[in-house]
Image (spheres, grey):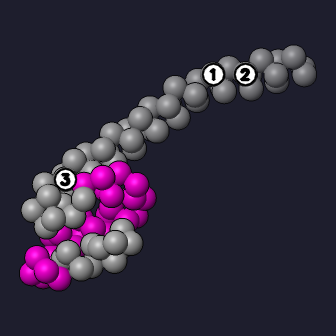
Amino acid sequence: MKLKTTALAAALAMGLVPAQQAAAQSMSEGLNMLQAALVNDFQQMGIPVSALFDLTLGQIAAIKSIVESDDNDSQKKGRIEAIIGN
């Protein structure tokens, strides 16, 4: 019985690893897409693009929200710089 349980656990673990890898890859691709979408905005506002690649997903989402807001560019730049610590 113990051998069957161990074999079942191993089979389940092997089946779950590809799903976890796919989810991680999908999240990474989503983060890369968000970063790429913000590169042009950073360049237009004179914010160093290199700062974009050190941010968390939460920071990037907050910045994306700011970029899409009705604030003027000066206000947007100030809010974004506050998030990235410039």
Asked whether 46 falls inside the magenta stretch, the response is no
Q: Which residues are magenta?
A: 49-75
Q: Secondary structure at mark 1?
A: helix
Badge 3 or badge 2: first in the primary sequence: 2
* 73 magenta-colored: yes
Residue 70 in sight from this viewpoint:
no
Q: Which mark lies nearer to you, 1 or 3?
A: 3
List x then y, in percent, for residue 35.
27, 51
The residue tagged 1 is 14
Residues marked 3 and 2 touching at CB (< 8 Å): no
- Residue 36, x across and y down, in percent: 22, 47
Q: Nearer the viewer, mark 3 or mark 2?
A: 3
Callout 2 touching callout 1 (CB < 8 Å)? yes
Return the residue nearer the eye: 4 or 47: 47
Position of the N terminus by quadrant: top right
CA separation in Å, label 2 and label 1: 6 Å
- Residue 1 higher or lower than 63, as above or below: above
- Using a 10 Å C-alpha cutoff, classify the residue at mark 1 as few (fewer than 14 neighbours), some (14 to 19) or many (20 or more): few
* Location of residue 66 (image quadrant): bottom left
Residue 41 vertical position relative to residue 6 in the rendered view, above or below:
below
> Residue 25, which numbered label?
none
Q: CA distance from mark 1 to mark 3?
A: 38 Å
User: Residue flagged by tag 2: what amino acid is it?
Assistant: Ala
Q: Which residue is mark 2?
A: 10
Q: Secondary structure at mark 2?
A: helix
For the C terminus, the image quarter is bottom left
In this picture, is 14 found above or below 84? above
Picture coordinates of residue 47, whole percent (x, y): 21, 64
Residue of label 3: 39
